[in-house]
Image (cartoon, helix red, strand yellow):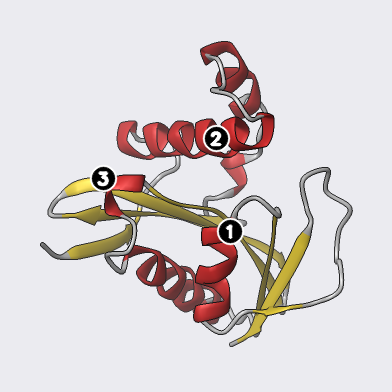
Amino acid sequence: MAWTVAPESFDTPDAALLRRDYYDEVASRYWGRPATGEEIVAGLTGDGAERLAPPTGLFVVGRHGGRAAACAGLLLIDAGTAEVTRVFVRPAFRSTGGGGLLLAAVESAARGSGVSRVRLDTRNDLVEARGLYAKHGYREVPAFNRGPYAEHWFAKDL
């Protein structure tokens, strides 16, 4: 089965469900228990996803064999910098190349916007994410924000 990755509005049914699944996983890992439906809704409310649309950003959905299986966002920070966010591959599709394709898609979009550097932050417990970023040329850098969940910071020159 083949992967396809394409821009999609953050609020289509597939994108919204991927964002929900993403938040469910990261919140559940953080709390060490399954997130409740109410907690997921609260976490998605006012999360800034509307900025993941032109002209301030982009959202992409990865499909494996036609099924929505992954997503990633790109947020333009300034003329030279963009931030990668909400990188998520559903567990059943991990280790099939989707994560790398998501990163390539948002990096290509960043280059197309004139950006020369992408960055992101992540947490200690998101081990798979940290491995994905390192595998694709991201290097750990000093903290560039003080986000409540930011424990590792990565950047990549394009």
Q: Residue at x 58, y 88 (%)?
A: 158
Classify mark 2: helix, strand or loop.
Answer: helix
**Quick one: 93 or 87, which is closer to the camera?**
93
Distance from the alpha carbon under mark 3 to that under mark 1: 23 Å
Q: Residue 23, labelled with which disc?
A: 2
Q: Which mark is residue 68?
A: 3
Query: 17 above or below 41?
Result: below
- Number of the front mark, 1 or 2: 1
Which residue is depicted at the point 58% across and 59% down?
Answer: 127
Q: Earlier in the sequence, mark 1 or mark 2?
A: 2
Which secondary structure lies at badge 3?
Answer: strand
Of 81 and 137, which appears nearest the observer?
137
Residue 122 location in percent, x, y? 68, 56
Q: Is 35 in front, or is 23?
A: 35
Q: Cβ–Cβ below 8 Å for labels 1 and 2?
A: no
The answer for how far apart the CA atoms under marks 2 and 3 are is 16 Å
Residue placed under numbered mark 1 in the picture: 127
x and y percentages locating residue 2 in the rendered image: 14, 65
Q: Is residue 107 left or right of residue 121?
A: left
Instruction: Point out the frontmost of discs 2 and 3.
Output: 2
Amino acid at circle 3: Ala
| Element carrying mark 1 | helix
